Amino acid sequence: MRPRPAPRPHRRPGVPLPNRNPDLTEATRILRAAGRPNAGILIDLLHFAPSGSSLAELRRLPPEWFHFAQVCDAPAGVPATTEGLIHTARAERLLPGEGGIDVRGVLAALPAGIPYALEIPHAARTAEAGARGYVHLAITAARRHLDALEAVPTQAATA
């Protein structure tokens, strides 16, 4: 097997959780084995919540491993089955602060200044409010919730 060339420096591949990697321990093992300076861990809150990983583990990882985070919320008790998780991921993610995921805790454990990407598809809300209406609702709710993060110490501030 020929070694693959390193990804271009401007690309930042991430190891998502838990689709192929069930927790931060496994993601860390993969990153260290890859040995690529631009590789990282993609934290998608929907997948982080049921991974069994802790905020303390997240805080201990090198800040350079985190290039952005996918932000959403979900009902308490994120579905345990793959089918349930896929359905929630594709059609029923909640806005930050509406569900049972510790959105503030996870984001505060990540390095300060990384970009957040809202990943909040919700089929019923989109059908009810229309795409533009749902986007307006989502932006308003996300800003309100994420603005409150400024009062929460981040990993960089507590390190």
Image (cartoon, grey):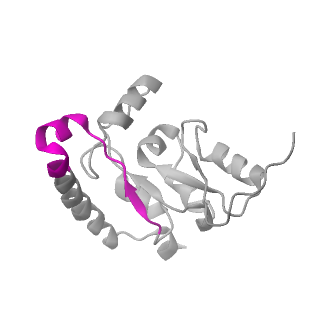
- State the image coordinates of residue 149 (x, y, percent, origin top left): 33, 67
- Snapshot quadrant of residue 122: top left
Magenta region includes residue 58: no
Can you name the residue that lies furthest to the bottom here? 157
Quarter holding the N terminus is top right
Q: Is residue 7 at all visible to an observer of this figure?
A: yes
Q: Is residue 124 magenta?
A: yes
Q: Position of residue 6 (x, y in %)?
A: 75, 57
Quadrant assignment for the C terminus:
bottom right
Q: Could you tell whether 124 is left or right of 5 in the image? A: left
Q: How many marks?
A: 0
Q: Quadrant of residue 57?
A: bottom right
The outermost residue toward the right is 1
| Of 131 and 104, the residue lying toward us | 131
Instruction: Identify the residue at horizontal 33%, vertical 72% (top origin).
Output: 150
Image coords of residue 100 (percent x, y) = 31, 43
Q: Nearer the viewer, residue 109 or 10?
A: 10
Q: Above or below — where is 48 with respect to 5?
A: above
Q: Who's the residue at 27% across and 67% down the image?
A: 148
Identify which residue is drawn at 70% across, 52% down: 31
Q: Residue at x 54, y 36 (%)?
A: 19
Which x, y percent locates residue 85?
41, 31
Depth check: give the residue in front, 128 or 155: 128
Q: Which residues are magenta?
A: 114-134
In this rendering, would 27 be left or right of 59?
right
Q: Does residue 77 appear in the picture of this structure? A: no
Q: Left or right? Give the position of 157 relative to 76.
A: right
Above or below — where is 79 with respect to 42? above
